[in-house]
Image (tube, coloured by chain):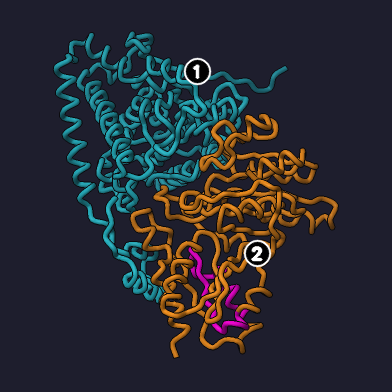
Chain colours: A orange, B cyan
Amino acid sequence: MAHGWEMQHDDSVIVIGQDVGANGGVFRATAGLQARFGKDRVQDTPLAEATIAGMSVGLATHGVKPVAEIQFMGFLYPALDQIVNHMSRMRYRTRGRLTCPVVIRTPHGGGIHAPEHHSESTETMLCHIPGIRVVCPSSPARAYGLLLAAIRDPDPVIFLEPVRLYRAMRQEVNDDGQALPLDHCFILREGSDVTIVTWGAMIIETLRAVDELESLGVSAEVIDAATLSPIDGESILSSVAKTGRLVIVHEAARNVGVGAEIAALVAEHGLYDLHAPIQRVAGFDTVMPLFRLEHDYIPSTQRIVDAVRLTLAD
Amino acid sequence: MPVAEFKIEYKQILDPKGNIVAPLPKFAADVGDVVRMYQAMTRVRVFDAKAVNLQRTGQLGTYPSSLGHEAAHVGVGAAMRPEDVLAPVYREFGTQLWRGVTMTEILLYWGGDERGNDFAVPRQDFAWCVPIATQTLHAAGAAMAFKLRKEPRCALAYIGDGGTSEGAFYEALNLAGARALPVVFVIVNNGWAISVPVAAQTAARTLAQKAVAAGIPGVQVDGNDVFAVREVVGEALATARRGGGPCLIEALTYRLSDHTTSDDASRYRDSREVAEAWALEPLIRVREYLRKAGAWTELWEQALLQDSAREVDAAVAEYLNTAKPSTDAMFDFLFAELPLHLREQRATARKYGAKPSGH
């Protein structure tokens, strides 16, 4: 829907990727676009991710704004050379002469019984790359507003789409062309005892945990980080200043995860606001298992509840 | 004046109706050998239908049907030696079953359990490769290992038509050619990479000619003709085994099914095209050949189908009776020895996980 709005209002926007045309994308995200905008503006590429990212660099530096789809996050890696060595630093190394307003959309995370390499959440690798934004919406409405913002942004954005939300969440979205701000997190619930920062599909377990905590008399503030790089540290710090406790929840592996960056930020700038050590609830530092064990990998509601209670223990 | 030119040969031995259109290969002298290939093709087709059905009834994950690929897959299996190494994509069940992978192992993997990758036989083969084209380089590397140790073994990598668009494919061809490695690449060109037809992948008239730039032979074969596939792959392996270098073979077939059970090909593919492809499907011609040779009757066919169904049912029962792995399985085999922080995480997983769940 956001694709459609922006293609309607900006002739320079095109959609490229594998199976985005007649098939409308394997998750149907581009369904109907080719019929509406034609085969020049909605193009199936050859089956080659380096091609998709590399041609995006060429297109974007020359006046065409690609919204590219990589079919699954596990297939992103052949594109990384182009993203790290060219897309992310084009503006920097040419001193602003050439720029790369590209959006790369890719599914994110597990939980839908998908085959191997279809369930990864490796955003931390991307957040480490200077010069790109990494965005991960937590609902259809936020996906709409953030995708519009990503397409309108003058710099490259990697847009991670949580697959569990494709399936789990139905929501009416106003197709009004209203973008949401990048580089800002969103407060989903206000609370006073503890701050929980999360993003993407982990919103599901987090909100369940918060409901459970509420019945135990615990008031949790929930922050949807939304833009993972650069992260909105200011909002997180002011929330922690209010609650004095921080729990970070993500599906991705814990080791060097985005949660570690958030924890470091609060340790540097908000340590004296904390009443208890920061807790991280994350995926394990192992390979995302095949799907019979994927729900044992993805952090559970109970793990979040227990982590919050740990911060509240005297 | 031209400084380089090329031509691509096309090989077919049995036409779609089972007529012999080229000299019969040596193996055809033993009708028992042909019967074994026909049995294998039938067996994998019965297995395939059951696997699709298991997915439809929620007892298997996403599954990539091999319907229509039986000749290509069984022909390759029959041409390889047991000590060779196979680097599959994810659809070549006919080759794997021929080489000793079990139906239960296939179901375990596609049912979301890594134990399916731990083939009892053949231990040396690579597991399924879902990332595209990466396996071609693994095969080239394995072939280099054989060459370094002077072993008379070959590696064989599969790739799909879509996969030939990936850089890794060209890198593998290039390396194999430059080092004269004992490796054979088989492109199973089934016409479609999910929704994208071959003509949208490349302007090349054949995929076999991708070999030309790597300086290695390229040949096209009727991938629905098990005789031709086995013959051409067998010759390529024999050449590679005696130090003659690699080969690229394009097997022309057709994906009679959806890409996987998650796909709906009716969104992008004309049903008339599929109906026409059914007339060329690979079992018909072998059946006709065997009938003419007095080795096929309707009664025998029924018995074969029943035997295959019994074998499949036994594998399905074994698969469905395999208990969910414990949460420890997420940590087992990550390293030879598990580091401390992962031992702690394993304890956390034990505490919160281990809920039994069905397939």
Q: Position of residue B357 (x, y in %)?
A: 28, 56
Left or right of residue B45: residue A101: right
Q: Position of residue B255 (x, y in %)?
A: 42, 27
> Do residues under tags 2 and 1 come within 8 Å of each other at their CB atoms?
no
Q: Quadrant of the N terminus of chain A?
A: top right
**Subunit under mark 1:** B
Residue in view at x 56 percent, y 36 percent:
A24
Residue range corresponding to the magenta coloring? A240-267
Spatial distance from mark 2 to mark 1, Cα to Cα?
54 Å
**Subunit under mark 2:** A
Residue in view at x 52 percent, y 26 percent:
B208
Callout 1 secondary element: strand
Callout 1 environment at 10 Å: few (<14), some (14 to 19), or many (20+)? few
Which residue is at the front of the view, A135 or B349?
A135
| Residue at mark 1 | B9
Q: Amino acid at mark 1?
A: Glu
Residue in view at x 42 percent, y 15 percent:
B276
Q: Which mark is residue A229?
A: 2
Can residue A312 be seen in this snapshot?
yes
A71 in magenta: no
Q: Position of residue A77 (x, y in %)?
A: 57, 51
Placement of B87 over or under B161, stated as above or below: below
